[in-house]
Each structure stands twice: as structure tokens, then as C-alpha cells.
Amino acid sequence: MFLTSAVLGTYAEFSPPKTDEAVQSVGLGWIPLIANFWAMMKLRIMRNWILSRVLVVLVCAIVPLAGESAESPDEYTLTYYRTQPRQGAPANPIDPYDCFQKNSDGQLSIESTGTYECAGLPNQYFHLFILKTRKGNPILVQELTPIRRLEYKCNCYGFVFLGGEYHLQATQVEKILLDDEWTIVPPQDVKPKDVGIFRDKSGTMIHAVIVEGRDPSGHIVVNSKSGYALPEKGMNPERAGTNQDHLAKIKVTS
């Protein structure tokens, strides 16, 4: 028994036990060791838990600060535009703002480029055409072919400036606004048929809407096409979305 106790590492000095009481008293010496060991483990577990909580708090505090220095993808500006009034402009639903040249019958003067681009849709392509502004500058438009679903027929820019018949890129819209001398309208003076243009912090155009009017509370409502969704009328501009299919995420800062 003495040899066994020595090997097990009992820390108390003692003579070889001679009675059952002595054996029982030596066995009780393990209790403080186990208690100390368990206390140390609890301290280690608690320490690790506290450190993990502190780390989480630090990460949650640092990440937003880092994000504030970068461009937030959900913050845009909204600017309203109005085209120049014209007398006797031929009615053409494909050119609701009379931005483009037309023939004697009032039809758009449009020419095929003879080229096609991948539309990113199964077995569908963009046929490229050229329109000309009233000043004669070329505008590239895209016609989806074949059209299998109505919501694919146009994007938001084609919906606003080309009656929903074509796709139109933001770079071409910038040319239209400049070439046709569109003017900026303060929000308080916005009227139906004015155009709202969303831009990100870098100034890049990302969406366009048509002003429908105002609701009973005086808030502006718009007609918007978001991505491949069908157009929606009577929307608040904050919910007008973008051509990346975002909805209800725009923070208007205009």
C-alpha cells in the first residue's frame, strides 16, 4: 500500500497504514486535489469564454468603422430631370420624350449594326441598333431576340426612354440627358413624366424611374422597372429598386 501511494503521488508524508481507518483517511487526501483541479479547469473555461466575448465585441465595433470609410452599396442620390418642352412633336410611344430623330411618318430612324451580343439568358441574344439624338449623335440600343418573357423585353432605362421596347445602357442615357439638354428639377417642383435618376456615391448611374405624381400626403410616387421584374406603378422612390434587383434598400440623400 505504501508503494502504491508513493507512485500515485500523495503529497502528505505518512507511515505505512496499519488500520482501515488509516486507509480511509489517506484516500480522503484526493478530494482537495480533485477540487483544486476542477477549480483550475473552471477558471480556464471562464477565462476563454471571457476572452471570446471580448473578441466578439471588438470585432463588432471595428467592422462598422472600417465599413464607414468604404463606399456603402446601399446609399444613393436621386436627381429629377425634365426635358425641354416642344410644340408639335409627333406622338410615338417608343419615344415618349421625343429624344430621337424620326422619319416623315413619325417612326424612329433606327439602323441595325448587324451585330449580336450574348444577353446572359438561355438561347437569347441582343441585336444591336443605332438611334440618333435630335442633334444627330448615335445612341446604341439593344433588342432582345427572341423574346420569351415580357419582363425580359427591356431594362429600366429602355422602359423610361424607349417605351419598354429596347434595352439601353446607363452610358447612353448620360448622352441623352446631355444632348437633349435635360434640366434638373428640385423635388418640390417635380411633376408627372419627370424622370428620376439614381446614382451611387461615385456618380455612376444605376437606375431610372418615371414620376407618376404624388400620393395624398404629397410624397412623390414613381413608375419603376427593377431588373427582370415587371414595372410597378405608384411606388415610393425609396422602394423603386435598382437594375440589380434590389428593392427597398435605397437611402435617398437628395
Image (spheres, helix red, strand yellow):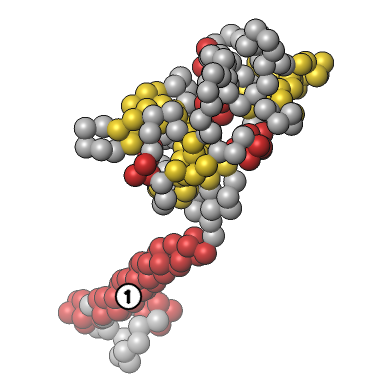
Above or below, comparing residue 213 to residue 73 in the picture:
above
How far from the left and from the top, in percent, is residue 210?
45, 29
Q: Is residue 235 left or right of residue 81?
A: left
How far from the left and from the top, in percent, is residue 16?
31, 86
Residue indicated by mark 1? 43
How far from the left and from the top, in percent, is residue 215?
26, 32
Q: Residue furthest front?
A: 87
From the image, which quarter does the N terminus lie in?
A: bottom left
Above or below, comparing residue 154 to residue 174 in the picture:
above
- Residue nearest the viewer, comparing 131 with 13: 131
Q: Residue furthest right?
A: 114
How far from the left and from the top, in percent, is residue 42?
31, 71
Figure quadrant of residue 158: top right
Number of residue marks: 1
Residue 149 seen anywhere in this rendered image of the structure: yes
Q: Is residue 232 left or right of residue 164?
A: left
- Residue nearest the viewer, comparing 242 with 209: 209
The residue that appears at 65% across and 7% down in the rendered structure is 105
Identify the element where label 1 is drawn.
Answer: helix
